[in-house]
Each structure stands twice: as C-alpha cells, then as structure tokens.
Amino acid sequence: MGKILGAFLMPHPAIMVKEVGGPEVEKVKASVSSAEKVGEKISQLKPDTIVIISPHGPVFQDAICLYDYDLKGSLAAFGAPEVKGQFNRDTELADEILKKAHERGITAVKSSSINLGRYGIKRELDHGVMVPMYFVTKYTTDFSLLPIAFGMLSYEDLYAFGTVIAKAAENLDRKIVVIASGDLSHRLTIDAPAGYNPKGREFDESLVKILQDFDIEALQNMEHSLIEAAGECGLRSIWIMAGSLDEYQVKANVYSYEGPFGVGYCIAEFVPGKKRDSLLQRLYDNRKRKIQERRSKEDPYVKLARRTLESYIRENKIPPLPDDLPKEMLNKKAGVFVSIKKHGELRGCIGTYMPTRDNIAEEIVQNAISAGTEDPRFDRVRPEELEELTYSVDVLTEPEPVSSPGQLDPKKYGVIVRKGYRSGLLLPDLEGVDTVEEQINIALRKAGISPWEDYRLERFQVERHF
C-alpha cells in the first residue's frame, strides 16, 4: 500500500557542494554531514518517488506548480557545470495529485501549462532541487522525482496540498519520501544577504523548536511580523511537507542547525508512526476563529472599511454611512489609507495622503472600494474571499518637508519622496521595513526615482486602526 516513508527538511546553499564551495565547505560542515546522513537514510528507505518542494522554481501567487519538463539541471550558475543531474519524472503521480488538488479546491498546475519564459523562468531544475539531490544521489539514484514549486497560498491551503500528496501516493500504491527544500532566516548577521534583523535569530530558534516538537498549531500561531522580518524562504515548503504527514504521529529529529553566512540552515528528519486523526479541519477552524476574534474588536474606522467593501462586492452598491459614527469621522478631513490582507499577505492597499472628500468617513469609503477593486498589483476581490479578509485604516497627518534622512524614523514616520511630477509614499511601521534606508529605497522604487537623483523628502504620521 502506498504511503509516506519519511520526510526531511534540507537547505539548498550551493556552497555546501564541494565543487562550488571549495575550502568554504568547512564553514558548513555540520550541514554537509547532516545532508550526507539524509542521503543515506533515503537510500535505506528505498522510495519509489521523491517529492521535493522548492522555493526557487515556478512560484506563482495563486497556484502550486508541478514541474513536468525534462528533469535536468546543473550548478553551472554557481561555477560548477560539472555538477549536474537528470531524473525520471513520475507523471502518473503528478496527474493524480493535480486531480485530488482540484477536488479539494486547491489551485495546482503543470509547468507546461504556463509560459515560463514570460516570467523569466528556465525549463531546468533550480538549485532548490539540485543541491539537496546532490547529496541524495550520492547514495541512491533508484527513484523517480517530482519537483514542486509552492505557491503563495495560505499556510493552511499548503498543508491541505500536502495531504493531497499523501492521498495520491496511497491511491497509486507509491512509497514516497518528501523533501522540504528551504533555508531559514536570511537576516542573521550584519553581512547577511538580505541585511540584518535581530528577529531573524528569534524566528530560527522558534521554528527549530516547533519542528523538533512537530507542533503544527504552534507553527500556525507564529506571528506574521516575525516571519516577515526573518526573510526566510523555506516556511511554505515546510507547510506542504507537514501536510503530507497529517495522518501520522511524527517523531522529529533535528540533525543540525547553523548560520555561518547570515542564513539559517536546518536539516531535520520526520518519521511517520502510527495513524492519527487529521489536523486539517482544526487548522481551518483556528484560522476562522482568529478572523472572527479580530472582527469582534473592530473600531468604527475599520468596520466602515470592511462593510463598505463587502456591500460593494456583493451587491455592487455603496452603503449609506452608519448613524453612530464618531463625530471626528464626520467633522474632520484627512488623508486615509485602507489596507486589506488575506491570511497575513497584502491583498490591496489604496490611499490618499491629502484629503479628497468632505470627511474622514467618506475618505474611508472611497479608499476601501479602491483597495479591493483598483489596486493594480492584485485582481479585484471576489465575493468568496470576503470572509477571509482583514483590514486596517491609517489616518494621515499633513505631510511636512524634511531636510535629511536623519529626521526620519520608519517606525514613527511615513515618507514621501518627490522629484518633479513623480512621487512615492510608504506608510510607517511596516513589517520588514526596519531602517530609514529601506524605507526611502522602497518609496523611490514606487516613484520610479533613482537614488542618485535630487529628490525631496517629506514625512507624516498616522493614526492606525486595526
């Protein structure tokens, strides 16, 4: 009978490969030793197929992608073209997973159905696959391979997709090993590739503890701000892998953790044991309960934004202003930004830095509709999404000019950059924006202004409503 034989978390820095890293491999010797152990373990398990989830393949906002091109790749991009691999595809398993995902309402696609060139994606195996497989193929090549790129779906939906992998294996009588390819925080040190953030270390320590306990509800309860600050690339891979073990009691063994180059590398084994009740519905219930708790605490600003968009999307009409709004919402004017999130990820944000309506309430109404229907980065909000959305409203003070970046503080002040007719605005106290330099650079990119141009700076404060 098909089943999950085991699962592993593996990082994918090319420097772990001796043909790439050379003497630098010594700095990751704990990870190399653990990766060798994983390769040996997998050879002992003798899987029919290895399913590997990568953060560096065809990653899409709204779909999980199964690679179905020729499974060939190399580390030529890292100066080691001689390190290459070619694998047999498990097409039947891919088809069964797609079928079961569709039945669950999870969007999953084959790479052949996407014009990858449009997204600058090559039809070859990425290093998120090649580095872990380098260590596996040292010990065995007697398996088929199914690489998958996670999508930017909710964690619960990714977990659900993992359960689909397990069900497909069972239906096809496949014995499977699942590998979650991913690094932890990329912000552990001052010279880290994504810059330093002290929360990077906190994230890694929390996640390693959660993995050791295999506590999926604790994983679900990780603060989104902590995840965002860490700059990780492996969490979604982990969620799919965890879902594949949903019906099993799991014993976890963390082989190693280190971060010598400012990036966290964790290698762990997850051994399925006796059957248990599925956790999936409880995860969805937990998510729904959190949204309901947040809505029960909404103030009039946020409630007005939410109810306005819900009415507009469901009935195509703008509701009248409630009779019980606070006087300041009706008597004062101000710029307002309405932000919408779905499962912690931005779903829309539109605002005005100066008032354009008769009062704050009308400003909220207009910008709530615009955030849900006109943000060019996102599709229009669909009716079925409304129950999954959360809102925040920022009421802005009037902008004031500043003479230097030293007068800014990304936690206290928002920033506006101006050059001629071009301008860019960034709100204060945003997740992952911790320095004045980051704040200004993001605003400049939004405005299409180069950092070396002679631009002007303005700052403002906000009254934030959740």
Image (tube, rainbow, N blue to C red):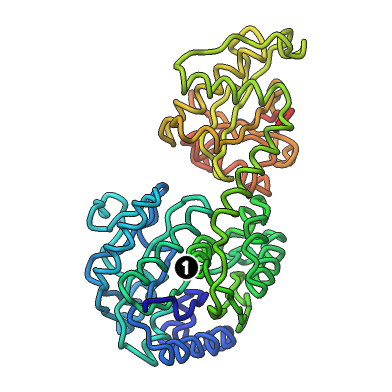
Q: Closest to the observer: 359 or 391?
A: 391
Reading the image, the residue beneath label 1 is 244
Question: In which quadrant of the rendered view does residue 126 lie?
Answer: bottom left
Q: Closest to the observer: 128 or 21?
A: 128
Q: Position of residue 71 (x, y in %)?
A: 26, 72
Q: Quadrant of the C terminus?
A: top right
Q: Position of residue 375 (x, y in %)?
A: 46, 30
Work out whether 157 lies above or below 234: above
Q: Residue furthest right?
A: 327
Question: In which quadrant of the rendered view does residue 326 lie?
Answer: top right
**Horizontal side, residue 366 vs residue 314: left or right:** right
Question: In which quadrant of the rendered view does residue 220 lie?
Answer: bottom right
Q: Residue at x 52, y 86 (%)?
A: 32
Hey, what amino acid is under mark 1? Ser
**Horizontal side, residue 69 vs residue 267: left or right:** left
Residue neighbourhood size for the residue with mark 1, other residues' Cα within 10 Å, grouped as few (<14), some (14–19), many (≥20): many
**Horizontal side, residue 46 vs residue 115: left or right:** right
